[in-house]
Image (tube, helix red, strand yellow):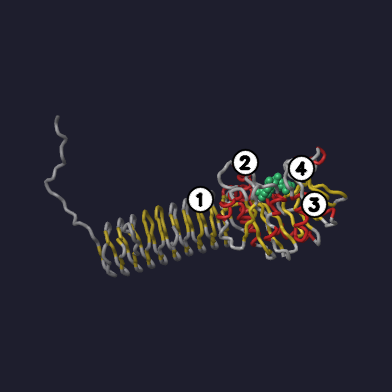
Amino acid sequence: MINVVILAAGQGKRMNSNLPKVLQPLAGKAMIEHVLQTVDKMDNVSKKVVVVGHQADVVRAHLSDNEDVSFALQQPQLGTGHALLQTLDQLDPSAEYTLVLLGDVPLIQPETIERLTAVAGDGMAILTTVLRNPTGYGRILRQKGRIVAIVEQKDATEGQKQIREVNTGIMLLPTARLASWLSELKTSNAQGEYYLTDVIGLAVRDGVRINSARPRRSFEVEGVNSKTQLARLEGIWQDHQAELLTEQGVTVLDPSRLDIRGKLTCGKDVTIDIGCIFEGDVVLGDGVYVGPYSVIRNAEIAQGTQVAAYTHIDGALVGSQAKIGPFARLRPGAQLADHVHIGNFVEVKNSIVGDASKVNHLTYIGDADIGARVNVGAGTITCNYDGVNKFRTVIEDDAFIGSDTQLVAPVTVGAGATLGAGTTLTKNAPAGKLTLSRARQVTIDGWVRPQKKQA
Ligand code: UD1
Ligand code: MG
């Protein structure tokens, strides 16, 4: 078993933000949540401890839903070794290893952690990478191929600065040795900090083997210290996700103009046009087309449905072979059956729309149950709210709602009923009949238009 410690006490000054660094969002989610999500995919975790310090309460509150995460407060922040020291009493002593992850290195993937554990043997393991420009990182010193020390940028000699293999900050340490190693750390270095990296020297002294692994992809070990780096990593991650989709057979018309902030699951022959944003959990069935500049969040869209440009879908279920948009808005609780048409400037909220029903223009459907094959005319409004309470509108199968109609809920339109255009329906409309509320049309004979008064 493995203890996992996530270091997240640092300030992140270079973000120039009031939000703590590890809570800055990447692909719609706090960086540290990405790390926790990766940890959740590991099956051998014992304890999970997050070290908080700078704005500790804000970080803790943000993660409060993670019941299996405990927090260690590091106050003041005296370095990465000091940070790990704060967690000792919360670790599982029987867990062979303790994995150190960083809250600002968000995209580490489970496969890479597996590689690291695979090389640890009965010693320890460090995740290293080779950088063209290693400036700022701790350099890996080797003798006869074996790691013997890590030297920080600020403590490195000119010769050591030439080394391009660096410490990613992610390492796997033997839990049983931690207490003694961490208590031996000194602050006699350029930054006056307790460096976690100094445990390497202690491991060498104690005859503990130090192995290393490399990440599969370089973005996994990229740290974020500024908004510039955050934006860069966001781009890399979006490119990566688009590539996973295209590899899997999705047609992405321009991978550089797709944003996925969550999880997008696609069937066969899905096409996604430019500028779309997917948030939360979205499932697109076989043959679904999503038109340009659509924003879709927490939704399921079944097989063959076409979503035209500029459509917003949030918390909705859409059946198969439906046509949605352009400029449509489906809000939470919208449930559309198969073959439904929802056209431009139509908003649907907390409503069921039955098979093959059509709501094509300029309409608000809220808190309604609409049956099958209903036609809702242009400019229809379900008046669901009296300013205090919400009420439901029921429209049964095969009803025809004339244009510019208001349905003042609670109200029911019976099966096959027709409502005349312009009706304000305040009482139930019986099945199979024409109902309308409309002042009779009159024409006034002999009427003349007012004339402009002469001055
Ligand atoms: C650290 C490593 C360096 C490595 C680099 C990778 C040390 C001494 N150096 O350097 O070898 O190349 O990461 O990015 O470990 N933190 C705390 N408490 C502290 C200090 C830091 O929780 O007292 C946290 C920070 O929030 C951050 C992480 O630890 O998540 C790394 O700290 P940072 O100050 O960025 O270390 P580096 O100087 O970058
Ligand atoms: Mg750093």
Q: Is residue 447 left or right of residue 337?
A: left
For disc 2, the neighbor class at 10 Å (few under 14, some 14 to 19, many from 20) is few
Number of the front mark, 3 or 1: 3
Q: Which mark is residue 189?
A: 4
Residue of label 3: 200
Residue of label 2: 14
**Do tag 4 and tag 1 residues touch (Cβ < 8 Å)?**
no
Q: Quadrant of residue 178?
A: bottom right
Query: Quick one: 378 or 352, which is closer to the camera?
Result: 352
Question: Which three-letter amino acid code belongs to the residue tagged 4?
Answer: Asn
Q: CA distance from mark 4 to mark 2?
A: 23 Å
Residue of label 1: 292
Q: Is residue 137 above or below residue 114?
A: above
Q: Position of residue 395 (x, y in %)?
A: 34, 66
Q: CA distance from mark 2 to mark 1?
A: 36 Å
Callout 1: SS: loop
Q: CA distance from mark 4 to mark 3?
A: 15 Å
Question: Which three-letter amino acid code belongs to the residue tagged 1?
Answer: Pro
Number of the front mark, 2 or 1: 2
Q: Is residue 320 left or right of residue 124?
A: left
Question: Which three-letter amino acid code belongs to the residue tagged 2?
Answer: Arg
Q: Quadrant of the C terminus?
A: top left
